[in-house]
Structure formats: C-alpha cells, structure tokens
Image (tube, helix red, strand yellow):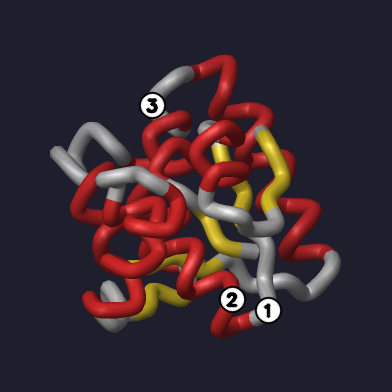
Amino acid sequence: MILDAGVFIGLDNPSRRRVILALMRRMQAEGVTPTTNEAVLAQAWRDPSKQVPMAKLVKATTVYPFGDPRAIGRRCAIAETSDVVDASLAVLADQRGLSILTTDPDDMARLGVAFQEI
C-alpha cells in the first residue's frame, strides 16, 4: 500500500491519528509494508520534533525516489492535473502493482489509479 501525503499529515490530527494508526497496525499484522516516495515526505515533513507519530511511521515505510519526471509529467497531462506529487504516486502504484491509501480520492480517481480512501 502506498501512502499519500494526507496520511502523514493526518497524523497531526488526534482524531485522524487513531484511524491511521489502526490501519497501519492492521497492515503490519498482514505483513504489508507501507510505501511512499520522497515527494510525499517533502510535502508533509515540517518539524520532526512536533511530528513524532509521522517520524515513527516514516521509519516503518519504504521510501522510493520521486520517479521518472517524464512519466510523471505525462500522467499529469493525461489526467489534466498539475499535482506532480499525486501523479508520482500514480506512476509508482502502476510500477509496483499497489494501490494508494489517500485522503484525496477525487485526485486519485482522475489519475486512474487504484486507491482506498481514508
């Protein structure tokens, strides 16, 4: 499962944090390692001293490079979006055969990628 920025940002909200941590525990019990990419972390990471739950989740997450800018740009053009971070996740999802855990289902639907809304 690929995590979008909203999952990491959601850890800053106490009510969302419970839901996200429960999902992460379930994934761990099922042997699923969460993944994301560098662009997502750049979008969500601000102050690790205040984002302790995020820092812990990052340690348990496989973080891939941003990806091929040409493929990501093409995905943006096809989906008629300028959000390169979401497009980079869509390309990663296609490459890895994974779905995306997202807080932004409309953008993921536009990008034509399998997703689960949180």
Residue carrying label 1:
97
Front residue (pair 35, 95): 95
| Discs 2, 1 touching: Cβ within 8 Å | yes
Residue carrying label 2:
94
Q: In the displayed image of the protein, which residue is found farthest to the top? A: 15
Please give left or right for residue 48 compared with residue 117 in the image.
Answer: left
The three-letter amino acid code for the residue at tag 2 is: Asp
Residue 73 vertical position relative to residue 18 in the rendered view, above or below: below
Position in image of residue 81 (x %, y %): 34, 44
Position in image of residue 31 (x %, y %): 78, 74
The three-letter amino acid code for the residue at tag 1 is: Gly
Front residue (pair 24, 69): 69
Between discs 3 and 2, the one toward the N terminus = 3
Q: Residue at x 27, y 73 (%)?
A: 66
The three-letter amino acid code for the residue at tag 3 is: Asp
User: Label 2's element?
Assistant: helix
Q: Residue at x 45, y 33 (%)?
A: 11
Q: Quadrant of the N terminus?
A: bottom right
Position in image of residue 9 (x %, y %): 38, 34
User: Label 3's element?
Assistant: loop
Label ID, residue 12:
3
Position in image of residue 25 (x %, y %): 72, 52
Please give left or right for residue 95 compared with residue 43 in the image.
Answer: right
Q: Residue at x 73, y 64 (%)?
A: 28
Between discs 3 and 1, the one toward the N terminus = 3
- Badge 2: residue crowd in 10 Å (few <14, some 14–19, many ≥20): some
Residue 99 vertical position relative to residue 12 in the rendered view, above or below: below
Please give left or right for residue 117 compared with residue 104 in the image.
Answer: right
Q: Residue at x 58, y 66 (%)?
A: 34
